[in-house]
Image (tube, rainbow, N blue to C red):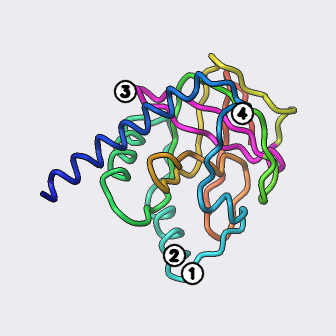
Amino acid sequence: MAATRWHIRGVMGLAAVLAVQGALMVPAEARRHHHHRREQAGEEYQQSGSEKDNAQTQAIASPVPETCDDRKFLADVEAAEGRQGDQPDRVEHVCGRVIAVSASKRTRSGLHGYFYVDVGNGVSIRIVSDLDRMSAPAWPWVAKGDQVDVLGRYYYDNARSQGIDWTHHGTGRTWPVAGYVTVNGTRYQ
């Protein structure tokens, strides 16, 4: 019975990813944005001491990939979908073609831009850019069809709330890795 539950969760996770990809056909203003718990609480999300230590250890223990590694990312997505409970944030370096760009949105932690990248195997991932902290032109500075290379923090709250954030040059108490987005060879941090 437990094996059946895991199989169903895996299928449900895949279905949610496919549903998200299908939702990309809807105009940006009609789409509902899902924010992960840390974005809702603001960039300075307060973690307990053990959570903070675990986040720091996780980021430091896993080396920052120098080049794009979509296979590692896909394996991390699969692992996240197969586990219950809170998921550790992971350093990810992905690349691919932009398949959709959303309008910017102001949250409690500032102005953010969102776009979706096809990382292969039928999977796309939401990229969150903190526009207040990035050195970049006015949003949108990325367009459908652009080739991007992204370094940031992969968060997984559930199959419908996941993405890569911390794509800017800054670091914080809970995330020690500076990220970036490279669009057609131009790097924004």
Q: Earlier in the sequence, mark 3 or mark 4?
A: 3
State how far apart marks 1 and 4 are (Cα).
34 Å
Q: Residue 48 has which mark?
A: 1
How many residues crowd mark 4 within 10 Å: few (<14), some (14–19), many (20+)? some
Q: Earlier in the sequence, mark 1 or mark 4?
A: 1
How many residues crowd mark 3 within 10 Å: few (<14), some (14–19), many (20+)? few
Q: Residue at x 86, y 32 (%)?
A: 137
Q: Earlier in the sequence, mark 1 or mark 3?
A: 1
Q: Residue furthest bottom?
A: 49
Q: Position of residue 63 (x, y in %)?
A: 46, 54
How many residues crowd mark 1 within 10 Å: few (<14), some (14–19), many (20+)? few
- Mark whose residue sits in front, 4 or 2: 2
Check the image and report above or below for 47 versus 183: below
The residue at which mark 2 appears reads as 51
State how far apart marks 3 and 4 are (Cα).
26 Å
State how far apart marks 4 and 2 are (Cα).
31 Å
Q: Residue at x 44, y 47 (%)?
A: 159
Q: Examine the residues drawn in magenta and state their main secondary structure.
A: strand
The residue at which mark 3 appears reads as 121
The residue at which mark 4 appears reads as 187
Q: Residue furthest front?
A: 30
Which amino acid type corresponds to the residue marked 2 in the rendered image? Glu
Which amino acid type corresponds to the residue marked 1 in the rendered image? Ser
Q: Is residue 22 left or right of residue 139?
A: left
Magenta-colored stretch includes residue 128: yes
Q: Is residue 132 left or right of residue 12?
A: right
Foreground: 146 or 188? 146
Q: Earlier in the sequence, mark 4 or mark 2?
A: 2
**What's the magenta region?**
112-134
Q: Position of residue 147 (x, y in %)?
A: 60, 21
Which amino acid type corresponds to the residue marked 3 in the rendered image? Asn
